[in-house]
Image (spheres, grey):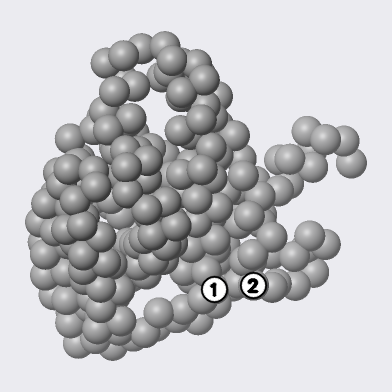
Amino acid sequence: MNVVAEFRAFLRAALVTPVERYHTESDAAFRRRRVVAAVTLVIGAVILAFALRIEPGDPRFYGATFALAGVWAGGAFLSGPLHLGRAHTRGGSGSSRAVVQSLALGVMLLALFMVGALVVARIPVLREPVQELLDHARVGSLPLVALITVVNGIAEELYFRGALYAAVGRRHAVAVTTVVYALVTAAAGIPLLVLAAALVGLVVAFQRRVTGGILGPIVTHLTWSLGMLFLLPPVLDALS
């Protein structure tokens, strides 16, 4: 199999062809999940808007972002059962936990964004809002910001690709969760962050559709977000 065919087969297995599973719930449970998901979304969006407007170095940022993670995760678990999901194996004869494919997707997304950074670094109107967001890591504690990145990445996937995805229903879940994720991120007031949320959200939503669970989206999200945290600042600084 040549490289192009191999790549197409990978994308088809990771993002297109669903793994068979049997996840069902009663109408009452589905209605309850929708109510909990809606309330969680409103509270989470308000806290996110507040957290991302806190000045770098202000200790309130850490408390606000951990509180945000608590809201996303708490709402997700209160909404109903969450599933880890399974991915296609390389040979196509079975399934396994969605780890290796998800790591690969996360690295691909990271590489794509690093290429985009080459453009962003040379355009002040795009670069400066991103630099201000990254100042939380520069001015504050980088290890603590990295921990926040991990905790919030997991919590976001528990909610957006776990609770909210299940609450929307199968037919439009990919589109709805991607749009909602981007709109919630718009509270930060950073256009490029909204674009990033839309692209990453779309990829992990397709993963959720294929695997039927949250493990794949979590692995992809963390691979991308931690890579951005550590690689984007030096790239922007070097090219600015």
The secondary element bearing badge 1 is classed as: loop
At 13% from the left and 75% from the top, the residue drawn is 35
Of 183 and 167, nearer the camera is 183
Query: Is residue 79 at least partly visible in the picture?
Result: yes
Q: Amino acid at mark 1?
A: Gly
At 15% from the left and 47% from the top, the residue drawn is 54
Of 38 and 111, nearer the camera is 111
The secondary element bearing badge 2 is classed as: loop
Residue denoted by label 1: 85
Residue denoted by label 2: 97
Q: Residues within 10 Å of mark 1 (few under 14, many from 20)?
A: many
Q: Is 2 situated left or right of 111 in this image?
A: right
Residue 189: x and y in percent read: 17, 35
Residue 145: x and y in percent read: 38, 55
CB contact under 8 Å: marks 1 and 2: yes
Image quadrant containing the C terminus: top left
Does residue 133 sit above or below 217 in this rendering?
Answer: above
Query: Is residue 185 at least partly visible in the picture?
Result: no
